[in-house]
Amino acid sequence: MKPFNEHIFKELLIKHRKGNLSLDEAALLDDWFEHLQVRKGNWYVDEEDKKNQLELLWQQIDVKTRSRDNRFRYTWYSAAAIILGMACFTFWPQPKELPHARNNATQATTEARQMLVYTCPIGATRVLRLPDQSRITLNSGATIRYPVTFSAKIREVELVAGQAYFDIKSQPDIPFQVKSKWLSTVVLGTSFEIRLHKNDRINIAVNSGKVRVSRANQKVVLEAGKQLYATNDQQPFRISDIPPEQVGRWQKGQWRLESASFRELSDAFEVIYGIPLITNNESVSGQTYNIILNYHTPMKDMVAVLAAIHNNDFIIQEDSVVLISKYH
């Protein structure tokens, strides 16, 4: 196969748009796509889907970027990330749903009732169906603890680690409560997400309905389109707006970053791959990212794309991935 050339690739896309690719050029374009993607088989389902995929790539190349000087470099690697992850929603399978009591969860017996503990595999999402037919979607690495049967007075689960999206069946006489470390979230019927950060910070965002969040000295009601940040130092809750459609977007197996800091990128990377992304370089730690991280993209491929966005180097170590500036 002819070595990949960024300039020629763009020219081929332009010619494809105009409909004047030669047979040899079309074959080269196909070869490069096959080299970039990670899914076995064709990167398209049929010719119509092939056309749509190329159009999607073109749209990604045309989006605005950080600066005029780096416009093409940024858009190309953003597009490459989408190809590597097959961002076309048609190809991403729905999160695997695990029916209640058949979740491969670890069972633990308490004095009150039998409990189940389930941890989502790294790089995947899982949907759990609870005894009341409520649904919990677990993000990569998240752990949930819940009963085999709910009591007649309250439906209670515990988010032990990670991030989860809750879609709760309304039962006005039996509140639903989520315990997460030192916070309690109570709902009657709504959809929301909770994320436990490693620095002992908790984030709660509401997609629909209302939730009541409380701890020893504070209590607040969050409505749809609101999110809360809490720390375990008794500081007041910090509440801000969030578009409801952004809550739980990771359920599709994609993590969208928009003008994200390196810290935000690192947090998302560790959730997906189970290994920290770090840097000891101030210039790298000050960089921002607009990109879609796809859960089923191999880690090495994703790291190469992330490094290329700002022309960095990278080192993959046993317990971490390091981004390094080429210019120090």
Image: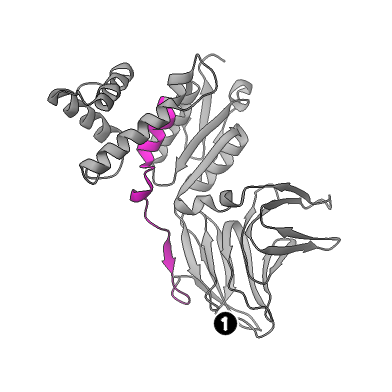
Where residue 236 appears, as percent x and y from the top left, is 83, 51
The quarter in which the N terminus is drawn is top left
Outermost left residue: 23
The residue drawn where x is 48% and y is 75% is: 100
Position of 14 with respect to 31 (left or right) is: right
Relative height, residue 39 to residue 31 (above, below): below
Q: Could you tell whether 319 is left or right of 56 in the image?
A: right
Residue 87 drawn in magenta:
yes
- Near mark 1 (Cα within 10 A), the count class, few <14, some 14-19 or many ≥20, is some
**Front-lying residue, 189 or 184:** 189
Rendered location of residue 23, percent (x, y): 13, 26
Q: Mark 1 — residue? A: 149
Label 1: element kind: loop
Residue 66 horizontal side relative to residue 156, left or right: left
- Whether the magenta-drawn stretch holds residue 34 is answered as no
Q: Give the range drawn in magenta.
A: 76-102
Is 221 above or below relative to 236? Answer: below
Name the quadrant containing residue 170: bottom right
Q: Can residue 37 be seen in this view?
A: no
Q: What amino acid type should be assigned to the residue bearing mark 1?
A: Thr
Residue for point 23% across, 28% down: 29
Residue 264 pos. (x, y %): 60, 38
Whole-percent x, y for residue 126 in the image: 46, 61
In this orientation, does residue 195 appear?
yes
